Image: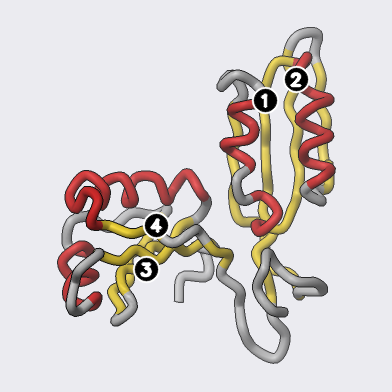
Amino acid sequence: MHPNLPLEQLVRRRGAAFQLAFATEAKELMPPADDFALDASRNGLLVLASNEEALERPVQVLRDVYGPQVVMEPPRVRLLGGVQIKEPIMHLRVSMYAHFREPVKAALAKRRAMLTEDYVRETYCVLRYEAPLASLLGFPTELARMTAGTARQWIALSHYAIVTRDPGGRAA
């Protein structure tokens, strides 16, 4: 179900006797989109997304409508099951002022991201990486903090790869 949406976040409504009823109602609030999907379940509303940015719009709508009654679990990476477990590998592109280049590269090295392109001009640069989605969770916020909000980043699904280690706190 939706392998192109490798991120999930479970949303529940505090005090709801039946989470499925809340999830079904909440699902009707948002029109379909390419970068996220909603799935009503007995556990609550499952928001599936292409990346962390894509989670923001449906999550904000739910907060606006339900206020403090809405409870968001942290985003989780979706793994593909089967004979072998596979995790999403993402393309990451960062464009920024060149003086931020080394700190950003160091931050991505700590996240086990593999540099695929490093394009530098006098004042501006573009970095391209591949990394497991689990290692990129929280990076958009970290990048904004490191670059005073001046960098731009794009994260998109590249492919799924066989899991060879613990993928972000989930058993392999």
From mark 4 to mark 3, how far is it between C-alphas? 10 Å
* Front: mark 1 or 2: 1
Residue displayed at 61% across by 27% down: 145
From mark 1 to mark 2, how far is it between C-alphas? 8 Å
Q: Say whether disc 1 or disc 3 marks the residue closer to the N-terminus.
A: 3
Above or below, 106 relative to 56 = above
Which amino acid is tagged 3?
Answer: Leu
Which residue does the numbered mark 3 point to in the structure image?
A: 46
Q: Which mark is residue 36?
A: 4
Residue displayed at 39% across by 54% down: 34
The answer to whether the residues at label 1 and label 2 have Cβ atoms under 8 Å apart is yes
* Front: mark 4 or 3: 3
Which residue does the numbered mark 1 point to in the structure image?
A: 146
Above or below, 17 relative to 71 = below
Q: Say whether disc 4 or disc 3 marks the residue closer to the N-terminus.
A: 4
Which amino acid is tagged 2?
Answer: Phe
The answer to whether the residues at label 4 and label 1 have Cβ atoms under 8 Å apart is no
Q: Is residue 82 left or right of residue 55?
A: right
